[in-house]
Image (spheres, rainbow, N blue to C red):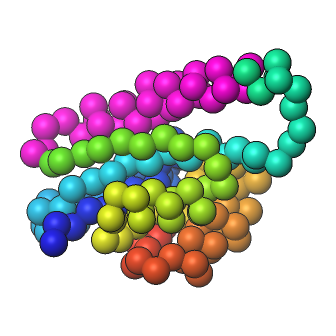
Amino acid sequence: MSNKILVAIDGSEGGKRALGAAVEYAKLTHSSLILSYIIDWSPYSFHTPEELDERQKRRESEIQRAHDSILNPEIEALGDQNLSIETVVRHGKIAEALKNIADEYKATQIYIGKLGESRVRSMIFGSVTAALVQTSLLPVTVVP
């Protein structure tokens, strides 16, 4: 069984530290990396057909922007370290989306920063990271 490490990336210093720790572990264990950025998105709102069409276009644009401004620069910064790296961008509730990606890609563990980008930084540990730690069936490494 090959080891796959899912790394939650959000552009924050905490996310960068989580990526750094995951890279070092991946090198030691010959694991592959799955870098993931989740766009917080609620499906629970009413929209007209025109608004739904516009919303879908906006989703696609956000996914491309996340690749271009968050994930691709992280991969470039890593340089050639002879690592297998995949990237995934999804919309949804962050902890739930990370669990779903871990299941889909058959990850063996998850790395996440203790504090990430948020409107209220202190809420991240209380919500996303804690929810992931409490609900994940995989080991979760929280990087300070």
122 up-or-down from 137: above or below: above
| Residue 135 at least partly seen | yes
Q: Residue 77: horizontal and vertical position, in percent? A: 28, 35
Q: Is residue 73 magenta?
A: yes
Q: Residue at x 76, y 46 (%)?
A: 43
125 up-or-down from 56: above or below: below
- 125 on left or right of 70: right
Q: Residue 59: horizontal and vertical position, in percent? A: 63, 29
Q: Nearer the viewer, residue 54 or 114?
A: 54
| Residue 17 at least partly seen | no
Q: Is residue 76 magenta?
A: yes
Q: Main SS of the magenta segment? A: helix
Q: Residue at x 86, y 42 (%)?
A: 45
Could you say which quadrant of the image residue 124 lies in? bottom right
* Total count of labels: 0
Q: Residue 39: horizontal and vertical position, in percent? A: 61, 42
85 up-or-down from 96: above or below: above
Q: Nearer the viewer, residue 7 or 105?
A: 105
Q: Residue at x 29, y 37 (%)?
A: 75
Could you say which quadrant of the image residue 33 lies in? bottom left
88 up-or-down from 140: above or below: above
Hey, which residue is sitting farthest front in the picture? Answer: 49
Q: Residue at x 70, y 67 (%)?
A: 127
- Quarter of the picture containing the N terminus is bottom left
Q: Nearer the viewer, residue 71 or 136?
A: 136
- 45 on left or right of 30: right
- 137 on left or right of 82: right
Which residues, given as a range, are shown in magenta?
54-82
